[in-house]
Image (tube, rainbow, N blue to C red):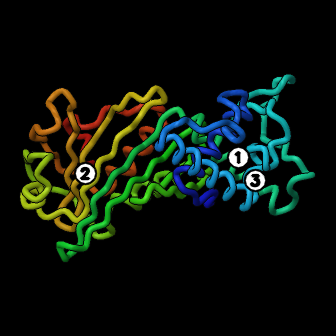
């Protein structure tokens, strides 16, 4: 994976806004406008202005709020065709702004933003990792935006900060999801299905042989529809997966089926291959 950006939520919003404007979408920057006459509006305007100053200082935005190396605002998204019918390969970096390694870095940033806003679907992983001691827990959210063989991996910190990676290799995408869900000592689950209350992680741990990773893995379509949501309970004494059936309600019991540690990798490959969730949870598909 290629680290493209490490930014705050406000900085990412400014970069995404500049990127969308370069595509002919979105409003002009707020610089120069009067802030909304409320405390919240004034604070938001100050945060946005600070984010823009930071991005200008880091060489990612120009003083007028455009992406460095934008080379005009007539550029299409990754994969768009030019007037001759050839695929746009993002070769319009302005050499007056950047050159050499700087141009390559700008291209990585712009391609990453392209994939993020153009994604056909996003794999969302939210995990709770429990260690040997009760107070040793780590929560994390990883978003994997997929578009035409490319991916943007986005880690969301507890403080709202973002780390974004550009991932050109589909197998690296699989690894990016497996790395935050499957513990190295995970073993296959065995036996009949087990029913557990999703809102009682303490009881779930006892029932499912003490998993060291509890995580949700879902797929969000471009229109925002959530589908294919699963709850994972993985650890050295077995792996279990439950399909979250939304109509049951958030407090309903879930049926966990035994799975093997490779289930997550197969799930990601299913999504990569079809652009939407493949049927999972039917007999014989959890552990194979």
Q: Which residue is mark 1?
A: 110
Residue shown at 62% from the left, 53% from the top: 51
Q: Is residue 78 visible?
A: no
Q: As rendered, which of 246 and 84 lies closer to the eye? A: 246
Q: As rendered, which of 46 and 200 lies closer to the eye? A: 46
Which mark's residue is nearer the viewer, 2 or 3?
Answer: 3
Q: Which residue is mark 2?
A: 232
Q: Which mark is residue 106?
A: 3
Residue shown at 48% from the left, 32% from the top: 275
> In this picture, is 240 found above or below 132?
above
Residue 239 in picture, x, y percent from top left = 21, 56
> In the rendered view of the protein, which quadrant contains the N terminus?
bottom right
Q: Are marks 1 and 3 in contact (CB under 8 Å)?
A: yes
Is 279 on the left or on the right of 169, as rendered? left
Residue shown at 62% from the left, 42% from the top: 16
Measure the C-alpha gap from mark 2 to mark 1: 34 Å
Q: Are marks 2 and 3 in contact (CB under 8 Å)?
A: no
> In this picture, is 283 found above or below 139?
above
Secondary structure beneath label 1: helix
Measure the C-alpha gap from mark 1 to mark 3: 6 Å
Q: Are marks 2 and 1 in contact (CB under 8 Å)?
A: no
Q: Quadrant of residue 104?
A: bottom right
Label 2 or label 1, whichever comes before in sequence order: 1
Density class for disc 3 (Cα within 10 Å; few <14, some 14-19, many ≥20) is many
């Amino acid at each position: 994976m290629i680290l493209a950006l490490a930014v705050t939520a406000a900085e990412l919003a400014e970069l995404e806004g500049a990127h969308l404007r370069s595509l002919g979408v979105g409003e002009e920057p707020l610089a120069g406008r009067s802030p909304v006459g409320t405390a919240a509006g004034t604070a938001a305007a100050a945060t946005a202005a600070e984010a823009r100053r930071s991005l200008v200082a880091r060489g990612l935005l120009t003083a007028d709020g455009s992406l460095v190396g934008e080379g005009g605002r007539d550029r299409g998204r990754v994969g768009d065709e030019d007037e001759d019918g050839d695929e746009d390969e993002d070769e319009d970096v302005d050499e007056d702004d950047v050159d050499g390694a700087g141009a390559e870095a700008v291209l990585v940033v712009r391609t990453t933003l392209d994939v993020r806003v153009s994604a056909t679907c996003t794999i969302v992983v939210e995990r709770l990792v429990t260690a040997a001691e009760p107070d040793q827990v780590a929560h994390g959210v990883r978003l994997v935006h997929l578009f035409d063989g490319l991916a943007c991996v986005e880690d969301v910190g507890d403080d709202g900060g973002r780390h974004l990676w550009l991932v050109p290799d589909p197998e690296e995408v699989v690894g990016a999801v497996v790395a935050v869900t499957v513990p190295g000592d995970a073993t296959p689950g065995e036996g009949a299905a087990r029913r557990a209350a999703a809102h009682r992680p303490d009881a779930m741990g006892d029932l499912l042989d003490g998993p060291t990773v509890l995580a949700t893995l879902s797929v969000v379509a471009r229109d925002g529809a959530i589908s294919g949501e699963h709850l994972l309970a993985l650890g050295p004494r077995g792996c279990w997966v439950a399909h979250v059936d939304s109509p049951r309600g958030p407090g309903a019991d879930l049926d966990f089926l035994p799975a093997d540690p490779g289930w997550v990798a197969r799930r990601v490959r299913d999504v990569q291959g079809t652009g939407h969730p493949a049927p999972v949870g039917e007999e014989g598909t959890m552990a194979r």
